[in-house]
Amino acid sequence: MPAGLPLNNKVALITGSTSGIGLALAEALAKAGANIMLNGLGDQGEIETIRTQMADTHNVDVRYHNADMTCPDAIADLVAHTQSAFGRLDIAIANAGIQHVAPVDEFPIEKWDAILAINLSSAFHLTRAALPIMKAQKSGRIINMASAHALVASPYKSAYVAAKHGLAGLTKTVALEIAQDGITCNAICPGYVKTPLVEAQIAPTAKARGISEEAVVRDVLLAAQPTKAFVEYDHLAGMLLYLVSDAGASVNGAVLSIDGGWTAQ
């Protein structure tokens, strides 16, 4: 492993890290020298390729665990497996999430239950399992990937908004409980990020509305974002690396916006 990297010998677990934001955060942590526990869905061959490429590129140890974020026992096993594999756990990032859009009175009950389980309850189960390890180490960083929707609402996203608001509250509560244990707990709240999921919506939306793809980005996807620009993976990684560094030791219980001014309105 290269010497002098800021996260040398640290261990990071990131849920939902086989694609999108989670994968970008895992790459940033690996580049900084951290050993990585990946988790998420996808083709097992593709995941193995991601794992080996990350390990080889950054000269760190990268493992994978397929824990189901709707299953508390599986999440506890993910944490236990991480400690067994690496001997410690320094950074736990609750990133896994799903979305469904529908009016409240038409919202499928099973979708509500799944969104609350994956977007909120899984963060509780991750934190609950990680804290004893971090307390024994007298150090640790818990990061909850929330959303601008942890601070403001949008119509037709009742479950997602409720879960992300709940995640902000969980973050603050945990931060108060562990404030003297050498551990911090914070939430990062991105605006729109150009993930593969979002990118795939642009062309169909342009066709359906009879407008250009540029107009879809500016006037539909980024209507609430004053910069009219997507939040970049690097912007999220920069915030994350600060929070997990020694320089971020006094940031605790913060719900931090990276949204181009969305929640300033």
Image: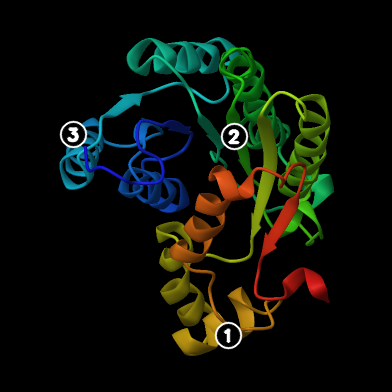
Residue labelled with disc 3: 45
Numbered label attached to residue 79: none
The image quadrant that residue 13 belongs to is: top left
Left or right position of 48 against 118: left
Report if the CB atoms under discs 2 and 3 are less than 8 Å apart: no
Q: Secondary structure at mark 1?
A: helix
Q: Residue furthest front?
A: 4
Residue labelled with disc 1: 218
Q: Secondary structure at mark 3?
A: helix
Amino acid type at image mark 3 = Gly
Residue labelled with disc 2: 141
Query: Which of the two residues, 58 or 18, is positioned nearer the viewer here?
Result: 58
Label 1 neighbourhood size at 10 Å, few (<14), some (14-19), many (20+)? some
Left or right position of 138 against 179: left
User: Reading the chain from its start, which is encountered first: label 2 or label 3?
Assistant: 3
Query: Which of the two residues, 23 or 155, is positioned nearer the viewer here?
Result: 23
